[in-house]
Amino acid sequence: MEVVHDYKKLKQKYQQPASKKAGFFIPVNQNKNKNMYYNENTVIYFNGQFVKAAEAKTDLYSQSLHYGYAVFEGIRSYPINGSTKMFKGKEHYDRLRHSAKVMRIPFEYTTEKLMELTYEVLKRNNFTDAYIRPIVLCSPNMALSKGKESYLAIETWEWTNGYMSNKMKIMTSSYRRPNADAFHVDAKVSGHYVNSILACQEAKDNGFDEALVLDSNGFVAESSGANIFYENDGVLYTAPKGNILPGITRATVIELCKELNIPVEEKLFTPAEMKGADAGFFCGTAAEVVALSSLDNVEFKKNWEDSLSYVIQQAYKCKVLEQQFRIEEKAVA
Ligand code: PMP
C-alpha cells in the first residue's frame, strides 16, 4: 500500500522507539528521571496566578485528594509553522467544563479563557511539543457533598511521543470499566483512573503492554487511557458511546475514515470477535494512534503497514501537524 505524505520528512524524534516502561501519560524519553514532569524553573497556572511548579501547594484536606473528586484533561500541543498550537484545544476545554458540570464542581472559566491561559503557560515555559494537563481541584471538605470551591491548575511538560513506531501486546483485563449507572463515564474524572491503574498494572504484571477493558456486560469498552479500534475485511470497528470515555482522538479517527472513504462502524463487540482480526489500534491524545500486535497472545493477521489502520495512523499524525496527506486510490480500493 502506498502512502504519500510529508510525515516521512518529519524529524527523527517522532520515530524513536517507545520504551516498554512507558505508559499513556508518561513522557517516553524521560521516564528514568525521578521527577519527569517539572524542574525548578517550570511555571504552572494555579489558582489565578502563574507560579513555579516546585513552589505551588495544595491542601491535604481537599475532597479531590480524599475521594478522587476532581476533573481533568489531557491535551497535546504541536509545532505548527514556527508556532505552538493545541490540537482540538476547544473540544478538550469544552469537555473539561462538561466534566465539572456533571460532577457538580463549581467552575466558572470559559473555554476561551482556558485556551488563553494555556498558551501563556506554554509560552512561559518555552514549550512547543508538549502535553498539557489542566486539573480542577476541590477545596477542603470531608463531607460527601458537592464541591464548594474549585482551583484550576494548568500543568505542562515537554513531550516527544515514540508510540507511533511501537506495537502493543495487550490482554483482556479481569477488571471491568466503571458501570455507567454508577459514574458519569463520559466525564474525565480523577477517581475513574483508579480502575485504569488496576487494569494497566495487571497487564504489565502479566508481561503485556496494556489492558483491554470490558464494560459490565462483557463487551469491549476501551483501554486504561485510550479508545480502541479493530479492522476486519476493510472495515474499522469501535465501541459505541455509553460505556467509554468518548475520546476526541476517536472522533478524529472517525472523521479521517470519512474523509478517506474507509468504512467505520460503532458497534458492541466481544474480545472473541476482535481476536485474530486483521489489525487493531489504540487511540488517544497521549497515545495518538498506536498499533496492537496481539490480543491475549493471538496476533493480528495483517502486516501493520498493509492495513487501513496504518493509513489512519499516518493520516492522524499529518492532521495534528497540519501536514498534507494523501493515499493512492488503489490503497483503499
Ligand atoms: N479513554 C480513556 C479512559 C482515556 O483516559 C482517554 C484519554 N483521555 C481516552 C479514552 C481517549 O480520549 P482522548 O482521545 O480525548 O484523549
Image: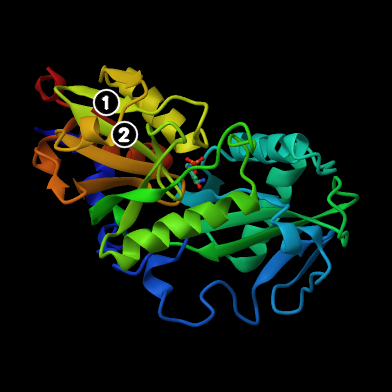
* Nearest to N terminus: mark 2 or mark 1: 2
Q: Is residue 116 visible?
A: yes
**Residue denoted by label 2:** 229
The kind of residue on which mark 2 rests is Phe
| Badge 2 element | strand
Q: Position of residue 232 (x, y in %)?
A: 17, 26
Asked if the residue under mark 1 is in contact with the one under mark 2, i.e. CB atoms within 8 Å, the reply is: yes
Q: Is mark 1 within 8 Å of ligand 1?
A: no
Q: Residue furthest right?
A: 148
Residue at 51% from the left image edge and 58% from the top image edge: 130
Q: Alpha-carbon neighbours of circle 2 within 10 Å: few (<14), some, or many (≥20)? A: many
Left or right position of 173 against 74 = left
On residue 174, the disc is: none
* Up-down relation of residue 332 to residue 76 (above or below): above
Q: Is residue 92 left or right of residue 51?
A: left
Label 1, residues with CA under 10 Å away: few <14, some 14-19, many ≥20: many
Q: Indicate the position of residue 115 as horizontal and vertical percent values.
A: 68, 44
Position of residue 290 in the picture relative to residue 329 (left or right): right
- Pick the residue in front: 292 or 203: 203
Where's residue 219, x and y in %? 37, 31
Q: Which image quadrant: the C terminus?
A: top left
Q: Amino acid at mark 1?
A: Leu
Q: Is residue 23 visible?
A: no
Cα gap from disc 2 to disc 1, whole angstroms? 6 Å
Residue at 26 percent of width and 17 percent of height: 261
273, 30: nearer the viewer: 273
Estimate the x, y position of residue 171 in percent, counting from the top left: 28, 51
Q: Nearer the viewer, residue 306 or 71?
A: 71
